[in-house]
Amino acid sequence: MRSEPDQLHAIASRKAALRLLPILCLVYFMAFVDRTNVGLAKTSLGADVGISAAAFGAGAGIFFLSYALLEVPSNLIMYRVGPRRWITRIALTWGTICACMMFVQGEVSFYLLRFLLGAAEAGLYPALMYVVTLWFSQKQRVSVVGILYLAVCAGLGLGAPLGGAIMELAGTGGMYGWQWLFLIEGLITLVVAAVFWRTVPDRPADAPWLSEQEAAVLTERAVAGSAPAHTSLKGNLRVAFGRPFILALAVIYFANQINSVAIQYNFPSIVQSLGVQGSFTIGVVSGSIGIGALIGVLVIPWLHRRAGGELTVLTGVTVATAVVAAIYTVTDGAVARILLIDAAMMLLIGVLPLYWSVAMARMTGLMAAAGLAFINTVGLLGGFTGPYLYGYAEGRGSEAGGHAVLLGAAVLGMLLLPLLAHALRAEDRKLTAGPILEDAR
């Protein structure tokens, strides 16, 4: 039977989930759609403004360079001004720049606007993760992050058909279909920013729909069992960025993002190369990876709750990803390839809530803001590397080269697992022994 504090926490958590998660998911859904809609426009951009496959790969990846460059500074500002103000600012600027993508005239303007889009969106995802650390206990976070990743599934499953339908407006008002795509989805994002500003408080104590006791118990449970908090980066750079488990997890995430982002940006063109015709039809088939991702974010966190061990599930999923990548490289059938890509996305997206749960259990406060941003920054570099290498191989007419990129990243993630396991055991021993010492010397 639950104690009175447990019952109060359950009621408050339910209120927080119902109030916050829909708008957090909507923000992340639009971010995902606005960054990946360029994949639908790939063929049209080549035909209409002369952007080659190699230039497209570089431009798609440049988004992640500027995002990575500003990720940590953005999240440190967010920590100072509060997530409500900062996430609203992020959404307003990225929505505006997404709409401006309609003015692309060639490779230079494509590179510039993709760079600015990444700069505008920098810090969004770790800011959302930071919100989770303020409102939900460690026990709840895998499930909560899994719910947030439903936005990715929706972006993958609905974003492509929606974008394909918008592109059918080609010729209306003398504009290309891809111009309508960027304009409409950018304007929708501005509306979402306004909704976020009006509905999301910075922290439980600011929520008018919580009682004082409910806000207090949410705050108390959110920090319970977390790593010791630090209030300044000065003298604590190693705590924020240099702990072995942070470095190992960041590189594993880097490998994951090489494959995940390469697939997201190139799947529509892969589908088209298999003989599928029409923007809407290509969008619908491309959206099948959203079904795979949905299965992943529902099943893999459930397996984690059942198995009880982070590393057991992480190991199984990572090894399975390498196996699927290996099978894909020797498969020729169109349907089989599509199904294998769907299976890969199930594993690549489904494992992400576990990465963030592992990190959030071992950092809090300013260290969480900085550390989560650092891990995401390294992953973003994978988001640049994947499309760039895949586009380079495609530009040289090398299908085997694209396969090597996917398989190599999957194997890299698998080989790093023993290092992560060792680092986590060492970190947990330190947390059990006492606070992490500040490196003030």
Image: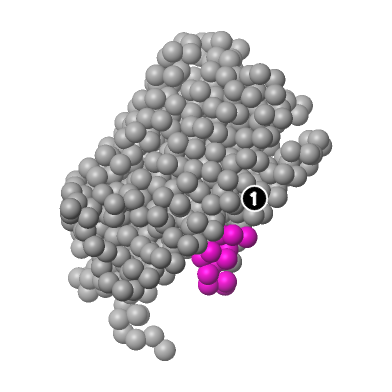
The region drawn magenta spans: 304-316
User: What secondary structure is the magenta-colored segment mainly?
Assistant: helix
Horizontal placement of 40 versus 61: left or right?
A: right
Quadrant housing the N terminus: bottom left
Residue name at image x 60 percent, y 12 percent: 47
Residue 163: percent from the left, percent from the top?
55, 31
- Residue 118 at what x, y percent from top left? 39, 31
312 magenta-colored: yes
Seen at 31% across and 74% down, the residue is 433
Please tell me whether mark 1 sits on a helix, a strand or a loop: helix
Q: Report which residue position mark 1 lands on.
A: 321
For image coordinates 34% across by 86% down, the residue present is: 3
Residue 228: percent from left, percent from top: 26, 65
Q: Which colour scheme is used?
A: one colour
Identify the image quadrant of residue 418.
bottom right
Residue 293: x percent and y percent?
Answer: 59, 49
Q: Nearer the viewer, residue 355 or 243?
A: 243
